[in-house]
Image (cartoon, grey):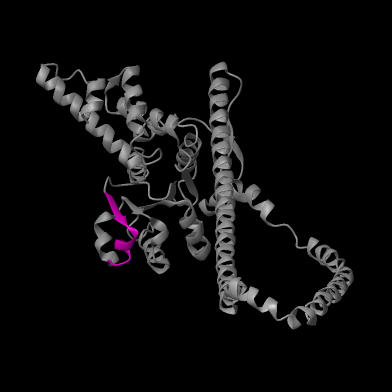
C-alpha cells in the first residue's frame, strides 16, 4: 500500500506556511527598471544650461584687465622726491605676505582635505549601506518570527476551541489519516500509551501524537518509523524514548530495548553493533547529519525479516527537510511526523503537569508558578533539559519527605523547585 503522505511532505507544508508570505515581497519582477532608464535620459538638456554660465566669466575677464592699465602710471615714478616715502613706509615688507610659498601651502592643503573628505564620505556611505542591510535583515527576521508566533497562537486557539467543543459535546474532531488520506476521527490516546499522555495536553503537539499512534494501530502492516521535529540545538530524545516505551506497552514492538545514538557516531560504527537491538527501537539524534548511505543501511537492517526494530529520527526542521529532499529513497519509510518545534511556555507547563502526574506526584498552583520562573533560565522547547530538571525536582521532594518522615506522600512543594 502506497502511503498517502509522508513526514517529508508534512515538513514541506510546515516550511511553506512559515516562510511563504514573508518571501513574497522579496520577489518583485524587475519590470520598473526600463522606466527608470527613460527617466534618467531626460536630464540631457542640462548641459545646455551650463554653457551660458561659462560665458559669464568671459565678461569678468575684461574687467580685470582694466585695473592692469591703471597700474602703470608714469607720473608718480618721475617724481624723485616721492622716492623717500617708500623708504619710510614699509610696503615692501608687505610683499612677503603676498609671497607665493604662502599661496602654495593652502593649495597643498586643499587636495589633502578633499581626499580626506572623500574617504570620510566613503566610510559614511559604507556604514549607511551596512545599517540598511542590517535593518532589512532584522525586519525579515522579525516578520518570520511574527509569522511563527501567529501560527502558534492560532494552533493554541484551535486546540482550546476543540477542547471546548469536546466538553460541550458539539461533535467529533476529524483528521486526515496519513496512510489512506481518509477523514477519520482523531480519537484519544490508548490507555496503554502511558508515557505519551503528557503530550496530549500541548496544543501544538497533541494532534500529531494522537494521530500517529492511532494510525499505527489501524495500519500495523505499514512502517512504524517516526520523525520528531525540534528546534535547532534543542533535545527531543526524551520524546523518542516515550514513544518507544509506549510502543512496547501497546505491543507494537517485541522488545523494550532502546538504543540512542548521535548521527555522527552512527556514521562511524558498523551495524553489527545493533544486532542486540532486535525487536526494539533505535533513536537517532540530529538525524539530519546522518550519511545517506548509512541511513539506507539502517532501514534495511531494521526490516521485519532482519532485526525488526523501529527507527525514530529527531532533529531540526530545516536539516531534516534537506536530508529527505536529497534522499528520496527513504522518504516512504517515514510516514509519521510529530512537531515539538512549536511548543512555547504554556505548552511546557502543560508538559510539567502531565509528567508530575505520570510519576505519581501532586503539586499545587504555586509550584507551577515557580516552574514558570525557572523556565526563564532555559529554553522553551528543550524537552530533554526540562524533563531532566523535573526529575531533579521530584528527587528533591522525595528526599525532603524522607527526612521529614513523610515518605510515600509524593507532593512537590515550591522549595523543592528552588532546591533542584
Q: Name which quarter of the figure residue 113 lies in.
A: bottom right
Q: Is residue 267 magenta?
A: yes
**Image height of 382 relative to 103, above or below:** above
Q: What range is drawn magenta here? A: 258-269
Image coordinates of residue 328 in percent, x first then y, are 52, 63
Is residue 1 something one can see in this rendering?
A: no
Q: Is residue 243 left or right of residue 122?
A: left
Q: Position of residue 133 (x, y in %)?
A: 58, 56
Q: Position of residue 157 (x, y in %)?
A: 56, 28
Q: Residue at x 32, y 62 (%)?
A: 264
Whether residue 410 sits left or right of residue 115 in the image: it is: left
Q: Quadrant of the N terminus?
A: bottom right
Q: Position of residue 291 (x, y in %)?
A: 39, 66
Nearer to me, 39 or 292: 39
If the image is split into quadrants, where does the C terminus sit? top left
Q: Give the answer, above or below, for where 200 lies relative to 361.
A: below
Please give the name of the residue rendered at 31% of the width and 57% of the height, measured from the top-left corner.
262
Number of callouts in the render?
0
Q: Residue at x 53, y 62 (%)?
A: 325
Image position of 207 (left or right of 364): right
Q: As rendered, which of 234 and 42 lies closer to the eye? A: 42
Q: Is residue 154 magenta?
A: no
* Res. 290 in view: yes
> Which residue sits furthest front?
81
For the residue pair 92 and 159, the one nearer the viewer reads as 92
- On screen, residue 220 versus residue 360, left or right, reads right
Instruction: Reply above or below: 284 against 105.
Output: above
Viewer-closest of 257 and 290: 290
Amino acid at each position: 500500500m502506497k502511503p498517502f503522505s509522508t513526514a517529508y511532505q508534512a515538513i514541506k507544508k510546515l516550511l511553506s506556511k512559515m516562510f511563504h508570505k514573508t518571501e513574497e515581497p522579496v520577489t518583485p519582477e524587475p519590470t520598473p527598471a526600463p522606466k527608470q532608464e527613460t527617466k534618467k535620459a531626460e536630464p540631457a538638456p542640462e548641459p545646455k544650461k551650463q554653457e551660458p554660465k561659462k560665458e559669464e566669466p568671459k565678461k569678468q575677464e575684461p574687467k580685470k584687465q582694466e585695473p592692469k592699465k591703471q597700474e602703470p602710471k608714469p607720473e608718480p615714478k618721475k617724481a624723485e622726491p616721492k622716492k623717500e616715502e617708500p623708504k619710510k613706509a614699509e610696503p615692501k615688507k608687505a610683499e612677503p605676505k603676498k609671497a607665493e610659498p604662502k599661496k602654495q601651502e593652502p593649495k597643498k592643503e586643499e587636495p589633502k582635505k578633499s581626499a580626506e573628505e572623500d574617504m570620510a564620505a566613503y566610510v559614511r556611505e559604507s556604514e549607511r549601506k551596512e545599517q540598511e542591510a542590517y535593518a532589512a535583515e532584522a525586519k525579515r527576521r522579525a516578520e518570520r518570527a511574527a509569522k511563527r508566533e501567529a501560527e502558534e497562537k492560532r494552533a493554541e486557539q484551535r486546540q482550546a476551541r476543540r477542547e471546548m467543543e469536546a466538553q460541550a459535546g458539539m461533535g467529533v474532531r476529524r483528521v486526515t489519516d496519513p496512510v489512506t488520506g481518509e477523514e477519520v476521527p482523531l480519537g484519544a490516546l490508548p490507555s496503554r500509551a502511558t508515557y505519551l499522555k503528557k503530550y496530549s495536553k500541548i496544543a501544538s503537539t497533541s494532534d500529531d501524537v494522537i494521530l500517529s499512534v492511532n494510525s499505527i494501530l489501524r495500519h500495523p502492516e505499514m512502517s512504524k518509523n517516526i520523525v520528531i521535529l525540534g528546534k535547532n540545538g534543542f533535545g527531543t530524545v526524551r520524546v523518542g524514548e516515550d514513544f518507544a516505551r509506549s510502543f512496547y506497552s501497546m505491543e507494537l514492538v517485541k522488545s523494550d530495548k532502546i538504543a540512542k545514538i548521535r548521527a555522527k557516531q552512527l556514521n562511524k560504527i558498523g551495524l553489527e553493533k545493533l544486532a542486540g537491538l532486535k525487536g526494539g527501537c533505535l533513536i537517532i539524534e540530529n538525524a539530519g547529519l546522518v550519511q545517506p548511505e548509512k541511513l539506507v543501511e539502517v532501514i534495511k537492517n531494521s526490516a521485519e525479516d532482519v532485526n525488526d526494530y523501529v527507527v525514530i529520527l529527531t532533529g531540526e526542521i530545516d536539516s531534516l527537510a534537506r536530508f529527505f529532499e536529497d534522499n528520496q529513497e527513504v522518504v516512504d519509510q517515514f510516514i509519521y511526523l510529530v512537531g515539538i518545534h512549536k511548543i512555547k511556555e504554556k505548552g511546557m507547563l502543560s508538559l510539567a503537569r502531565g509528567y508530575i502526574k505520570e510519576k505519581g506526584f501532586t503539586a499545587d498552583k504555586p509550584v507551577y508558578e515557580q516552574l514558570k520562573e525557572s523556565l526563564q533560565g532555559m529554553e522553551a522547547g528543550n524537552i530533554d533539559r526540562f524533563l531532566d530538571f523535573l526529575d531533579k525536582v521530584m528527587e528533591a521532594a522525595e528526599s525532603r519527605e524522607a527526612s521529614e518522615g513523610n515518605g510515600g506522600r509524593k507532593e512537590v512543594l515550591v522549595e523543592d523547585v528552588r532546591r533542584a
